[in-house]
Image (cartoon, rainbow, N blue to C red):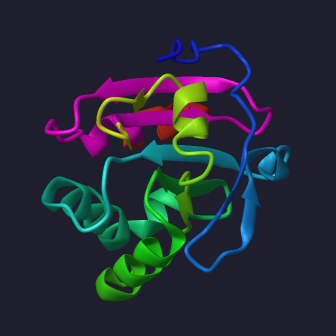
Protein backbone atom coordinates (compact mmCIF):
# COMPACT_ATOMS: atom_id res chain seq x y z
CA UNK A 1 0.00 0.00 0.00
CA UNK A 2 1.33 3.42 -0.93
CA UNK A 3 1.24 6.56 1.15
CA UNK A 4 -1.95 8.58 1.37
CA UNK A 5 -1.66 11.96 -0.44
CA UNK A 6 -0.92 14.67 2.10
CA UNK A 7 -3.00 17.81 2.49
CA UNK A 8 -1.41 20.53 0.36
CA UNK A 9 -0.06 18.14 -2.30
CA UNK A 10 -1.36 17.55 -5.80
CA UNK A 11 -3.97 14.79 -5.91
CA UNK A 12 -3.04 11.83 -8.14
CA UNK A 13 -4.93 12.13 -11.42
CA UNK A 14 -6.96 9.24 -12.76
CA UNK A 15 -9.45 8.23 -15.44
CA UNK A 16 -11.98 5.51 -14.64
CA UNK A 17 -15.27 4.31 -16.14
CA UNK A 18 -18.47 5.17 -14.29
CA UNK A 19 -21.52 2.92 -13.85
CA UNK A 20 -22.61 3.89 -17.37
CA UNK A 21 -19.17 3.01 -18.77
CA UNK A 22 -18.34 6.68 -19.44
CA UNK A 23 -14.78 7.75 -18.72
CA UNK A 24 -14.39 10.25 -15.86
CA UNK A 25 -11.08 12.09 -15.35
CA UNK A 26 -10.30 13.85 -12.09
CA UNK A 27 -8.26 16.63 -13.74
CA UNK A 28 -11.22 17.49 -16.02
CA UNK A 29 -12.75 19.24 -12.99
CA UNK A 30 -9.77 21.58 -12.50
CA UNK A 31 -10.79 25.20 -12.56
CA UNK A 32 -14.44 24.16 -12.54
CA UNK A 33 -15.36 22.24 -9.38
CA UNK A 34 -13.93 20.87 -6.18
CA UNK A 35 -14.10 17.06 -6.11
CA UNK A 36 -14.90 14.84 -3.16
CA UNK A 37 -13.39 11.42 -3.96
CA UNK A 38 -14.98 8.73 -1.80
CA UNK A 39 -13.39 5.27 -1.90
CA UNK A 40 -15.52 2.46 -0.49
CA UNK A 41 -15.01 -1.32 -0.21
CA UNK A 42 -18.01 -3.00 -1.88
CA UNK A 43 -21.22 -2.20 -3.70
CA UNK A 44 -24.32 -3.63 -2.06
CA UNK A 45 -22.66 -3.95 1.38
CA UNK A 46 -24.43 -2.50 4.40
CA UNK A 47 -22.06 0.29 5.47
CA UNK A 48 -21.30 1.34 1.89
CA UNK A 49 -25.01 1.49 1.06
CA UNK A 50 -25.68 3.52 4.21
CA UNK A 51 -22.91 6.00 3.42
CA UNK A 52 -23.87 6.52 -0.20
CA UNK A 53 -27.60 6.67 0.55
CA UNK A 54 -26.79 9.48 2.99
CA UNK A 55 -24.99 11.24 0.11
CA UNK A 56 -27.98 10.60 -2.17
CA UNK A 57 -30.34 12.04 0.44
CA UNK A 58 -28.22 15.22 0.80
CA UNK A 59 -26.93 15.37 -2.78
CA UNK A 60 -27.05 19.17 -2.98
CA UNK A 61 -24.28 19.40 -0.38
CA UNK A 62 -21.96 16.98 -2.17
CA UNK A 63 -22.77 17.64 -5.83
CA UNK A 64 -23.58 21.16 -6.96
CA UNK A 65 -22.13 23.99 -9.06
CA UNK A 66 -19.01 24.09 -6.87
CA UNK A 67 -18.51 20.43 -5.99
CA UNK A 68 -18.60 17.02 -7.67
CA UNK A 69 -18.68 13.75 -5.74
CA UNK A 70 -17.05 10.64 -7.19
CA UNK A 71 -17.54 7.26 -5.54
CA UNK A 72 -14.76 4.78 -6.29
CA UNK A 73 -14.53 1.04 -5.66
CA UNK A 74 -12.80 -1.98 -7.18
CA UNK A 75 -16.21 -3.37 -8.21
CA UNK A 76 -16.99 -4.10 -11.86
CA UNK A 77 -18.95 -1.52 -13.87
CA UNK A 78 -21.91 -3.90 -14.15
CA UNK A 79 -22.18 -4.27 -10.36
CA UNK A 80 -22.01 -0.48 -9.98
CA UNK A 81 -24.74 -0.02 -12.58
CA UNK A 82 -27.07 -2.45 -10.80
CA UNK A 83 -26.36 -0.86 -7.39
CA UNK A 84 -26.87 2.64 -8.77
CA UNK A 85 -30.24 1.66 -10.23
CA UNK A 86 -31.30 -0.15 -7.04
CA UNK A 87 -30.46 2.80 -4.80
CA UNK A 88 -31.21 5.73 -7.13
CA UNK A 89 -27.69 7.19 -7.05
CA UNK A 90 -27.43 10.20 -9.39
CA UNK A 91 -23.68 10.67 -8.97
CA UNK A 92 -20.81 8.82 -10.64
CA UNK A 93 -19.69 5.50 -9.20
CA UNK A 94 -16.29 4.77 -10.69
CA UNK A 95 -14.91 1.30 -11.30
CA UNK A 96 -11.29 0.71 -10.25
CA UNK A 97 -11.70 -2.88 -11.39
CA UNK A 98 -8.85 -3.12 -13.88
CA UNK A 99 -5.99 -2.88 -13.34
CA UNK A 100 -7.54 -4.02 -10.08
CA UNK A 101 -7.35 -1.31 -7.42
CA UNK A 102 -4.69 0.73 -9.22
CA UNK A 103 -6.24 4.12 -8.39
CA UNK A 104 -7.03 3.15 -4.79
CA UNK A 105 -3.40 2.02 -4.49
CA UNK A 106 -2.16 5.41 -5.75
CA UNK A 107 -4.25 6.99 -2.99
CA UNK A 108 -2.85 4.59 -0.39
CA UNK A 109 -6.21 2.96 0.32
CA UNK A 110 -6.09 -0.41 -1.48
CA UNK A 111 -6.09 -3.55 0.64
CA UNK A 112 -4.31 -6.01 -1.66
CA UNK A 113 -4.99 -9.01 0.58
CA UNK A 114 -8.75 -8.45 0.40
CA UNK A 115 -8.87 -6.93 -3.11
CA UNK A 116 -10.84 -3.88 -2.06
CA UNK A 117 -10.50 -0.23 -1.13
CA UNK A 118 -10.48 1.03 2.41
CA UNK A 119 -12.85 3.89 3.30
CA UNK A 120 -10.72 6.75 2.04
CA UNK A 121 -12.07 10.25 1.49
CA UNK A 122 -10.15 12.99 -0.34
CA UNK A 123 -11.28 16.53 -1.04
CA UNK A 124 -9.52 17.96 -4.08
CA UNK A 125 -9.89 21.68 -4.71
CA UNK A 126 -10.33 23.36 -8.10
CA UNK A 127 -6.55 23.63 -8.48
CA UNK A 128 -6.08 19.88 -8.02
CA UNK A 129 -4.68 20.21 -4.50
CA UNK A 130 -5.63 17.75 -1.77
CA UNK A 131 -7.39 19.73 0.97
CA UNK A 132 -8.80 16.97 3.21
CA UNK A 133 -8.01 13.29 3.75
CA UNK A 134 -9.30 10.52 5.95
CA UNK A 135 -8.87 6.76 5.91
CA UNK A 136 -11.01 4.27 7.82
CA UNK A 137 -11.11 0.49 7.98
CA UNK A 138 -13.77 -1.28 5.88
CA UNK A 139 -16.03 -1.88 8.89
CA UNK A 140 -15.71 1.69 10.22
CA UNK A 141 -18.35 4.13 8.88
CA UNK A 142 -17.33 7.72 8.19
CA UNK A 143 -18.78 10.87 9.72
CA UNK A 144 -20.04 12.90 6.78
CA UNK A 145 -20.19 16.02 8.92
CA UNK A 146 -16.41 16.09 8.51
CA UNK A 147 -16.92 16.22 4.73
CA UNK A 148 -19.38 19.09 5.11
CA UNK A 149 -16.89 20.99 7.29
CA UNK A 150 -14.08 20.44 4.78
CA UNK A 151 -16.29 21.63 1.92
CA UNK A 152 -17.40 24.70 3.90
CA UNK A 153 -13.75 25.57 4.56
CA UNK A 154 -13.18 25.91 0.78
CA UNK A 155 -15.86 28.56 0.35
Quadrant for the C terminus in the image: top right
User: What residue is rendered at 31% in x and 86% in y?
Assistant: 86
Above or below, 85 against 114 in this view is below
User: What residue is rendered at 55% in x and 59% in y?
Assistant: 95
> Where residue 117 sits in the image (x, y, percent)?
39, 39
Magenta stretch encompasses residue 104:
no
In which image quadrant can residue 134 be found? top left
> Where residue 140 sits in the image (x, y, percent)?
15, 36
User: What is the span of residues highlighted in magenta in the rendered image?
Assistant: 118-147
Question: How many numbered badges does the structure rendering display?
Answer: 0
Q: Is residue 127 left or right of residue 8?
A: right
User: What residue is rendered at 81% in x and 44% in y?
Assistant: 27
Q: Is residue 147 left or right of residue 22?
A: left
> Where residue 76 sits in the image (x, y, percent)?
48, 65
Above or below, 19 against 154 in this view is below
The answer to whether any part of residue 155 appears in the image is: no
Above or below, 89 against 114 in this view is below
Magenta stretch encompasses residue 124:
yes
Q: Is residue 32 left or right of residue 21?
A: right
> Where residue 47 sits in the image (x, y, percent)?
17, 54
The answer to whether any part of residue 56 appears in the image is: yes
Which one is in front, 58 or 86? 86
In which image quadrant can residue 5 be found? top right
Above or below, 106 against 25 in this view is above
Q: Is residue 135 left or right of residue 4?
A: left
Which one is in front, 122 or 85? 85
User: What residue is rendered at 53% in x and 71% in y?
Assistant: 77
Amino acid sequence: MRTVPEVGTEAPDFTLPDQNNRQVTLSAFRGVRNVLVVFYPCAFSGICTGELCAVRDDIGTFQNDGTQILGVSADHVFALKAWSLDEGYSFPLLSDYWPHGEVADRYGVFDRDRGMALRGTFLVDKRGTTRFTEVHAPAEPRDQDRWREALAALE
